[in-house]
Image: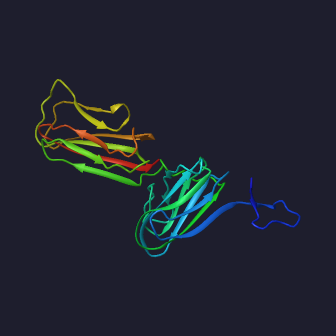
Amino acid sequence: MAKLARDLATPSGGGATLNPRETIFGTGTLGAVNAEVVIPVDGCSTVSLDMRGTFSATVGLEGSVDGTNWVSIPARPVNIASIAYALGFTAAGAYVAKCAAYRLVRARCTAFTSGSVTATVVAQNGLLDDSLQGMVTPTLSTTVGTAGTATTLTIASPGAGLRHYLTYLSINRFATALLTAAAAPVTVTTTNLPGSLAFSFPAEAAAQGTIDRWREDFAYPLATSAQATATTIVCPATTGVIWRVTAGYYVAP
C-alpha cells in the first residue's frame, strides 16, 4: 500500500493535502563528525544510503523508535565487491538495510578526516531481498599447522551488531608418520559456536601420508553464539599430525 505524503504548502481553505508516495528520501552534505541526514520511515521496510564525493570519512545508518535514542543498523553494499554487512562505510557507493523496526533513520558521519560526503537516504515499503544469504559462501578462512603442533583457525570478530554464519567447516588430519592406535579419540574444540561444539577424530592406526577428512555442509547456516566475537576451531597438538582447518561463512546481524 502506498504511503501518504503531506504537501509542504497549505492548500486554500486550510487543512492538508495528502498524496500517495512510494518512497521517502532526504539528502545532505556530511562534512564533520556527527553531521547527519534524518528521514521518517513509518511504514517502510527497506532503507538505502548512497554516498558520493571525495572524502576520508565513515558514515553509518542508525535507527530510532523514540527520536532520542539511536542504534546502529547493519547494512550491506549493493554495488561493491564485498557483500558483508557492516556498521559504517568509508567508500562511495550504495548500501541497503532493513528499517521496519524504526520510526526514524539517519545517516551519520561517525568519523571524519577531510572532504565531504553527499549522502542520500531513501526508504520504501519494498522488502529487502536477502535470499542469497545462506545460499552462497562469500568468505573463506583457512589455516594449516606443522607436524605435532596445535592448530587454531581464528575468524576475526565481525564488529558490533554482527555475527558469523558458517556455511561449512572442513577439518583435515594428515599423518606425517605412522600413527598407532590409542584408547581415546582426538577432540577438536571450538569457541563461540552453540553448545561449545566439538568433534571427535578416531585415534586409529594410520599409514604415513594418509589423510582423514571431516567436512560439515550445514543444511542451514550455523549462527555463532555471540555478536562482535571471534570464532575459533582448535585442533590439539597430536604427534605425527598436521592439521588444516577451513571455514566458509558470511557476516550478518
Q: In the depicted view, which residue is nearer to us: 54 or 45? A: 54
Residue 35 drawn above or below residue 105: below
Residue 130, position as x, y percentages in the image: 54, 51
Residue farthest to the top? 183
Residue 191, position as x, y percentages in the image: 31, 38
Residue 226, position as x, y percentages in the image: 39, 40
Q: In the depicted view, which residue is nearer to us: 18 or 126? A: 18
Image position of 47 (left or right of 223): right
Residue 190, position as x, y percentages in the image: 29, 37
Image position of 133 (left or right of 210): right
Residue at image coords 66%, 61%: 24
Q: Quadrant of residue 58?
A: bottom left
Image position of 146 (left or right of 105): left
Q: In the depicted view, which residue is nearer to us: 84 or 36? A: 36
Residue at image coords 38%, 54%: 139
Q: Quadrant of residue 9?
A: bottom right
Residue at image coords 17%, 23%: 183
Residue 188 drawn above or below residue 146: above
Image position of 174 (left or right of 159): left
Residue at image coords 34%, 52%: 140
Residue farthest to the right? 13
Residue 45 drawn above or below residue 10: above
Color style of the picture: rainbow
Q: In the depicted view, which residue is nearer to us: 152 or 70? A: 70
